[in-house]
Image: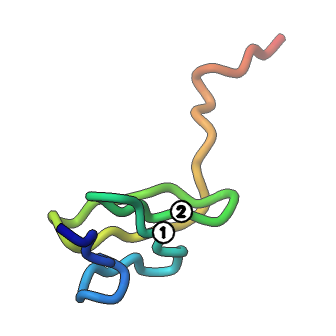
Amino acid sequence: MADVDECNSGYMCIDGTCENKEGNWTCKCPLETSLVVLNETVQNCSGIVSIQLSNIKTN
């Protein structure tokens, strides 16, 4: 059975790059963005990744 190319079959990777894999697919996001899975066929690379200030030590 031939592999389906999800990237050319309606699967969406918004603001990222869809990479077809055998039996699956991946949405690769640009640096400083994070992956948000909207549903089984739509993923979105969204915004700048925030830094949690609570993890930064201050004097």
Name which residue lies at 27% across and 69% down.
3
Q: Residues within 10 Å of mark 2 (few under 14, many from 20)?
A: some
Q: Which mark is residue 28?
A: 2
Drawn side of residue 10 relative to residue 36, left or right: left
Q: Amino acid at mark 2?
A: Lys
Circles 2 and 1: CB atoms closer than 8 Å = yes
The amino acid sitting under disc 1 is Glu
Residue drawn at point x = 67 percent, y = 57 percent: 32
To which residue does mark 1 refer?
19
Colour pattern of the rendering: rainbow
State the image quarter where residue 44 is shown.
Answer: bottom left
Q: Is residue 31 above or below residue 50?
A: below
Is residue 54 positioned above or below 26 on the image?
above
Tell whether 35 sits left or right of 48.
left
Query: Closer to the camera, 52 or 20?
Result: 20
Q: Quadrant of residue 29?
A: bottom right
Query: Which quarter of the rendered picture does the C terminus lie within?
Result: top right
Callout 1 crowding tier (Cα within 10 Å): few <14, some 14–19, many ≥20: some
Between residue 24 and residue 28, name the one nearer to us: 24
